[in-house]
């Protein structure tokens, strides 16, 4: 083969090959063979490569119509070119299918992850929305009881309740707030409850200064305190002290709520809606079921939150 036909042959063969690759990419980008028509993965590359080699041969037969030696070589090499191009395009087709399958699996995993996260977010939002009415109904019942007996205390409680709800609404949509903000809302809650119970409710809070800036999920502590008040004050006439402590221990923020209870009463044995919702929220956020600990000893009921600082 002369030098010029060889260069032209190689040039156009490369162009036809690249054109075949682009066509193959377009086809498999919009249509991917499945198990039922998997034979197309073999037939299509074979027909495509044959068509490319035939088109290449037709073009060069016209281009070098006077070169009999080259035309004879072109004709004799037709089958070899077809086999070579067919094998290469077949491998590229298999590679395209594999890449497409992997990309599809990755996209499916990403969508499943998004759906799971949306489901978790929706359940978390539902749990938080359930906590608010749970507390609100108790407060409204107390206000109703105070309207006639003590109108001034009823007005005071309405204002405190308004401030509390306004503060908690500001935290809506936030996945984390500082512990100091959480304790500020807790202080408002205690003010509301002290209007209800007066001198009977005593509060002791011990908060290490190093933990005040730590971020926690909102409205985790208030249901614990509500549970403590429910089992500590309901059914008793004397003073009751609710103790809240916050400290750092290794890689955890420990929040402990304690209240006295009557060991003859079965009340503290149940965890109620508030604690069960906290357990569920902790599982959804951290994926663990060991972050809410409960104990009852010596007429003292204790609930402890262990919040991972690295999560």
Image (tube, rainbow, N blue to C red):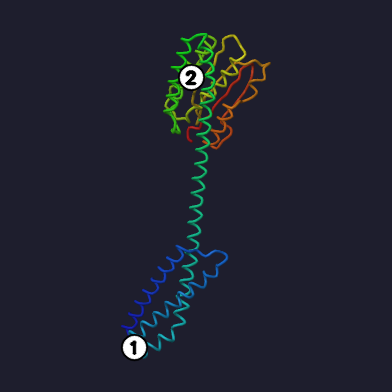
Residue 268 percent across, percent down from the top left: 63, 21
Q: Quadrant of residue 276?
A: top right
Q: Nearer the viewer, mark 1 or mark 2?
A: 2
Task: Choose between 185 and 294: the one closer to the eye.
Answer: 185
Q: Residue at x 52, y 13 (%)?
A: 196
Q: Residue at x 42, y 65 (%)?
A: 26
Q: How many marks?
A: 2
How packed is label 1: few (under 14 Cα within 10 Å), some, or many (20 or more)? few
Q: Nearer the viewer, residue 121 or 3?
A: 121
Mark 2 residue element: helix
**Residue 210 visible here:** no
Q: Is residue 8 above or below residue 118?
A: below
Taking depth in this image into account, of 144 and 25 the one nearest to the observer is 144
Give how far across and how far down residue 102 sits, in percent.
50, 57
Determine whether, in the image, residue 8 is placed left or right of residue 165: left
In the picture of the structure, the residue carrying the numbered disc 2 is 189
Q: Residues within 10 Å of mark 2 (few under 14, many from 20)?
A: many
Q: Is residue 169 visible?
A: yes
Q: Residue lying farthest right? A: 264
Query: Vertical placement of 137 versus 102: above or below?
Result: above
Distance CA(mark 1)–CA(mark 2): 97 Å
| Up-down relation of residue 60 to residue 40 (above or below) | below
Q: Which residue extends farthest front?
A: 148
Instruction: Estimate the x, y position of residue 67 in percent, counting from the top left.
Output: 34, 89
Task: Give the answer, above or below, for where 83 lies relative to 219.
Answer: below
Disc 1 on helix, strand or loop? loop
Label 1 belongs to which residue?
65
């Amino acid at each position: 083969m002369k030098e010029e036909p060889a260069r032209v042959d190689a040039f156009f063969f490369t162009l036809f090959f690249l054109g075949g690759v682009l066509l193959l990419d377009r086809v498999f980008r919009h249509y991917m063979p499945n198990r039922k028509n998997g034979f197309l993965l073999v037939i299509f590359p074979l027909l495509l490569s044959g068509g490319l080699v035939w088109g290449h041969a037709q073009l060069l037969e016209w281009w070098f119509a006077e070169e009999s030696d080259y035309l004879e070589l072109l004709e004799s090499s037709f089958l070899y070119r077809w086999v070579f191009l067919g094998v290469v395009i077949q491998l590229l087709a298999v590679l395209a299918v594999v890449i497409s399958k992997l990309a599809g699996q990755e996209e499916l995993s990403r969508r499943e992850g998004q759906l799971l996260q949306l489901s978790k977010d929706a359940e978390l939002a539902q749990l938080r929305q359930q906590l608010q009415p749970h507390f609100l109904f108790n407060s409204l019942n107390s206000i109703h009881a105070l309207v006639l007996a003590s109108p001034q205390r009823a007005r005071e409680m309405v204002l405190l309740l308004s401030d509390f709800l306004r503060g908690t609404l500001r935290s809506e949509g936030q996945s984390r707030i500082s512990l100091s903000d959480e304790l500020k809302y807790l202080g408002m809650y205690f003010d509301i409850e002290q209007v209800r119970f007066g001198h009977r409710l005593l509060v002791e809070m011990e908060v290490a200064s190093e933990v005040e800036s730590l971020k926690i999920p909102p409205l985790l502590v208030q249901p614990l305190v509500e549970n403590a008040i429910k089992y500590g004050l309901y059914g008793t006439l004397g003073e009751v002290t609710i103790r809240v402590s916050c400290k750092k221990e290794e890689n955890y923020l420990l929040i402990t709520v304690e209240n006295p209870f009557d060991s003859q009463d079965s009340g503290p044995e149940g965890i109620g809606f508030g604690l069960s919702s906290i357990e569920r929220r902790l599982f959804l956020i951290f994926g663990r079921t060991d972050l809410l600990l409960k104990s009852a000893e010596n007429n003292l009921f204790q609930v402890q939150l262990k919040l991972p600082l690295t999560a």
